[in-house]
Image: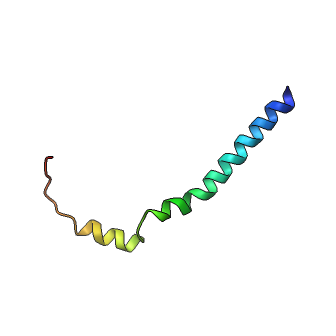
């Protein structure tokens, strides 16, 4: 029983470590470079609109 529990914990930890290692690359895929994002943010309109 103890071996099974440890195996499950180890598998979970390995999966989390892999996911955290891949996270920065996946986040970067959907984002523009920081300079371009700042440029777009500065160019936004200040008025709000109701939809």
Q: Residue farthest to the top?
A: 1
Give the total number of marks visible in the rendering: 0
- Residue 25 position in % (x across, y down): 55, 63
Instruction: Identify the colour scheme used.
Output: rainbow
- Residue 27 position in % (x across, y down): 49, 59
- Where residue 41 sits, quadrant-wise, is bottom left
Foreground residue among 41 and 25: 25
Residue at horizontal 67 percent and vertical 51 percent from the top: 17
Taking 45 as reference, is 20 left or right?
A: right
Residue at horizontal 83 percent and vertical 31 percent from the top: 4
Foreground residue among 35 and 28: 28
Residue at horizontal 13 percent and vertical 51 percent from the top: 49
Residue at horizontal 81 percent and vertical 37 percent from the top: 7
Foreground residue among 39 and 1: 1
Taking 25 as reference, is 46 left or right?
A: left
Q: Please say if 27 is above or below 17.
A: below
Q: Please say if 9 is above or below 39.
A: above
Task: Work out which quarter of the rendered image holds the N terminus and state it.
Answer: top right
- Where residue 8 sits, quadrant-wise, is top right
Taking 21 as reference, is 2 left or right?
A: right
- Residue 30 position in % (x across, y down): 44, 62
Taking 43 as reference, is 14 left or right?
A: right
- Where residue 42 sits, quadrant-wise, is bottom left
């Amino acid at each position: 029983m103890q071996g099974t529990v440890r195996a499950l914990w180890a598998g979970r930890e390995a999966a989390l470590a892999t996911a955290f290692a891949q996270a920065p690359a996946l986040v970067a895929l959907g984002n523009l470079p920081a300079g371009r994002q700042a440029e777009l943010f500065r160019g936004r309109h200040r008025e709000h609109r109701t939809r």
